[in-house]
Image (cartoon, rainbow, N blue to C red):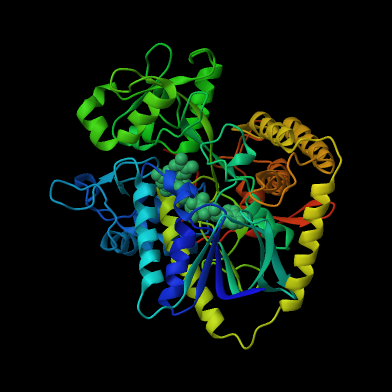
């Protein structure tokens, strides 16, 4: 059994920022990540990160209050206002910290951090590094990790790369540690810890048409869910308006922030036809634009009844190369077109998980010593619809907060507890893996995954209704039964990705089941959750957070109030 004072699961932005905060508090840290940290999905973030710096001439009078208001309105009033206020108040400080650590932000002619307009924001407040912001931020944090690893007064910063966490161990409501599989050797190991922080990212890959990395399977959300921690607002899934046709690679909102326009098959800027996007046009919030693209396609305004165009040609080659070089590369490599001379064929695709592990503004959960931060967590700052640029901010603000709080918790602990529980769970995990290896069933895991993706794409997408959601419930139940009969195509110990994917698939199925249960129960439309059979927001009944609990018989739903602060819920008009 290994022991570390603190364990951070996840090497993306939230995980690395939490690990730095722990080390800054003199706590010894181990980061466990199923991929090398800089291959985490954070590295793919494109368009930018929000903070009310007021560096753009049109953003001069920006304040944290205005940023908070835009975020809460964007969330369709489901975000907890204390959490949003905390995030927007800390935003500027965290951006300058990243700048001082060397993050190569794009600059204004005067040398300040440049800011571009983004959807649902009253001011241009999205800081960026061309269209590779996640890459710049993640490498900056990883450099800090290396610095801490090599620091003279060694505090211990250990990275376990390519280890898959397969269990979260809780005893009497207190977190004891995790069980993890060393993918390369095939060895299972118990990790005892004073505190555990989960920063395992989103669950986008329960869908097929997703911008997310294939590693975003949902297992990191399933582990605490299985251990008794509820998932909050899990039915709220963001669909990004502009993903590359067929491949669903993200085409950043930064394209529209820089002046790109959406065109139908007649060459019209069709967003002007729809009441909720006619004012802000291409920089209206994501939920609204995604729905209006689909409305336009359904009304016959699309190409091949499946896509519309994003046109950047008028921006010119110079601006495209300076501000959107990654988008030009993606279009050339994956669609054989050049946005300097061709419009980009786009369609909406799954992009972000607003819901997640239920935690408060301190990153604390219902289990003592267990914290969550980043996309896997639901604090909640994004409510029913996240604004672009707010997720990267969420990772570094709440990563730092969760890390600091876990440090204080560990420093107050008396003695080490929970070894017995770890030994028991390790044994059970070994048995589970052995049984999987010996299974003689005929079901191939990837077939179940593809079937799950189809159910989620077709029945739990941008437009939802009771009959298709009920079908989805049944479809997933059948997939759960098929999962009982899966067979691994490789049973060796070393580098067994057949085993890894089979273990992760169970997490995907259970989280998907919670998404569908939450969506079926919520009989209203709010933010990203649009019910064609209940098209209006209903604050009297539904201005509340969903809590989904795992039980052996399926999902149990409960609810809790939203923290309303200074911003009174109003109809969301743009
Ligand atoms: C293509 C794309 C572009 C985006 N662009 C923007 C943008 O411009 N602005 C913005 O604000 N947001 C953007 N987002 C969203 C934002 O990038 C993510 O929400 C954020 O980076 C998530 O960071 P994270 O640290 O929470 O998780 P991730 O970066 O996803 O990291 C998760 C980590 O957890 C580890 N992990 C997961 N499960 C396990 C397990 N069981 N065992 C061990 N390790 C595990 C993984 O190895 C990984 O290291 C974008 C998202 C995508 C997909």
Q: Is residue 279 above or below residue 547?
A: above
Residue in the foreground of this view, choosing between 572 and 363: 363
Q: Which percent across, then down, holds residue 154?
A: 41, 78
Q: Which percent across, then down, holds residue 406?
A: 53, 74
The quarter of the image holding the N terminus is bottom right
Residue 113 relative to residue 392: left or right: left
Residue 568 visible in the snapshot: no
The quarter of the image holding the C terminus is top left
Residue in the foreground of this view, choosing between 141 and 265: 141
Going by the picture, which residue comes out furthest to the bottom?
A: 414
**Residue placed at 78% from the left, 34% from the top?**
475
Q: Which percent across, then down, holds residue 527?
A: 54, 42
Q: How many marks?
A: 0
Going by the picture, which residue comes out furthest to the left?
A: 110
**Residue placed at 15% from the left, 52% from the top?**
111
Q: Is residue 466 above or below residue 389?
A: above
Residue in the foreground of this view, choosing between 366 and 145: 145
Residue in the foreground of this view, choosing between 564 and 112: 112
Residue 264 visible in the snapshot: yes
Q: Which percent across, then down, holds residue 259?
A: 29, 31
């Amino acid at each position: 059994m290994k022991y570390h004072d603190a364990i951070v699961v996840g090497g993306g932005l939230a995980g690395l920022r939490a690990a730095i905060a722990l080390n800054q508090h003199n706590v010894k840290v181990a980061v466990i990540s199923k991929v090398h940290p800089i291959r985490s999905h954070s590295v793919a973030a494109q368009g930018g990160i929000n903070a009310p710096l007021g560096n753009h001439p049109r953003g001069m009078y920006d304040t944290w209050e205005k940023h908070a208001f835009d975020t809460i309105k964007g969330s369709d009033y489901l975000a907890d206002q204390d959490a949003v206020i905390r995030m927007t108040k800390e935003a500027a400080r965290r951006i300058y910290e990243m700048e001082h650590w060397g993050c190569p932000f794009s600059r204004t002619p005067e040398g300040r951090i440049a800011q571009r307009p983004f959807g649902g924001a009253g001011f241009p407040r999205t800081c960026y590094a061309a269209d590779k912001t996640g890459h710049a931020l993640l490498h900056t944090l990883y450099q800090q990790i290396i610095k801490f690893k090599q620091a003279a007064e060694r505090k211990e910063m250990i990275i376990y790369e390519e280890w898959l966490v397969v269990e979260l161990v809780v005893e009497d409501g207190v977190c004891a540690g995790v069980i993890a599989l060393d993918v390369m050797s095939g060895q299972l190991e118990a990790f005892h810890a004073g505190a555990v922080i989960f920063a395992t990212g989103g669950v986008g890959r329960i869908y097929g048409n997703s911008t997310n990395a294939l590693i975003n399977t949902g297992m990191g959300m399933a582990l605490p869910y299985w251990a008794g921690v509820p998932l909050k607002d899990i039915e709220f899934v963001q669909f990004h308006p502009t993903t590359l046709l067929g491949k669903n690679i993200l085409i950043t909102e930064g394209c529209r922030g820089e002046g790109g326009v959406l065109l139908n098959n007649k060459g019209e800027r069709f967003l002007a036809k729809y009441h909720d996007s006619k004012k802000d046009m291409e920089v209206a919030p994501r939920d609204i634009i995604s729905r209006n693209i689909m409305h336009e396609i359904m009304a016959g305004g699309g190409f091949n009844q499946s896509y519309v165009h994003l046109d950047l040609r008028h921006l010119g080659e110079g601006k495209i190369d300076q501000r959107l070089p990654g988008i030009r590369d993606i279009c050339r490599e994956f669609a054989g077109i050049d946005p300097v001379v061709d419009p980009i064929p786009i369609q909406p695709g799954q992009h972000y998980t607003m819901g997640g592990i239920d935690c408060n503004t301190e990153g604390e959960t219902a289990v003592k010593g267990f914290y969550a931060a980043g996309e896997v967590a639901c604090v909640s700052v994004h409510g029913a619809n996240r604004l672009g640029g707010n997720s990267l901010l969420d990772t570094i603000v709440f990563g730092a907060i969760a890390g600091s709080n876990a440090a204080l918790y560990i420093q107050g602990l008396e003695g080490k507890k929970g070894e017995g529980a770890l030994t028991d769970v390790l044994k059970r995990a070994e048995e589970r893996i052995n049984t999987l290896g010996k299974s003689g069933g005929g079901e191939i895991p990837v077939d179940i995954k593809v079937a799950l993706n189809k159910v989620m794409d077709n029945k739990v997408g941008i437009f939802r209704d009771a009959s298709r959601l009920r079908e989805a419930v049944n479809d997933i139940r059948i997939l759960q039964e098929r999962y009982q009969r899966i067979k691994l195509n490789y049973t060796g110990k070393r580098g067994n990705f057949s085993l890894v994917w089979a273990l992760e698939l169970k997490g995907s199925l259970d989280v998907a089941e919670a998404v569908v249960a939450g969506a079926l129960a919520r009989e209203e439309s709010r933010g990203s959750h649009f019910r064609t059979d209940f098209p209006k927001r209903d604050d009297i009944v539904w201005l509340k957070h969903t809590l989904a609990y795992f039980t052996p018989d399926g999902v149990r739903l409960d609810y809790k109030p939203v923290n309303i602060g200074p911003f009174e819920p109003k109809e969301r008009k743009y």
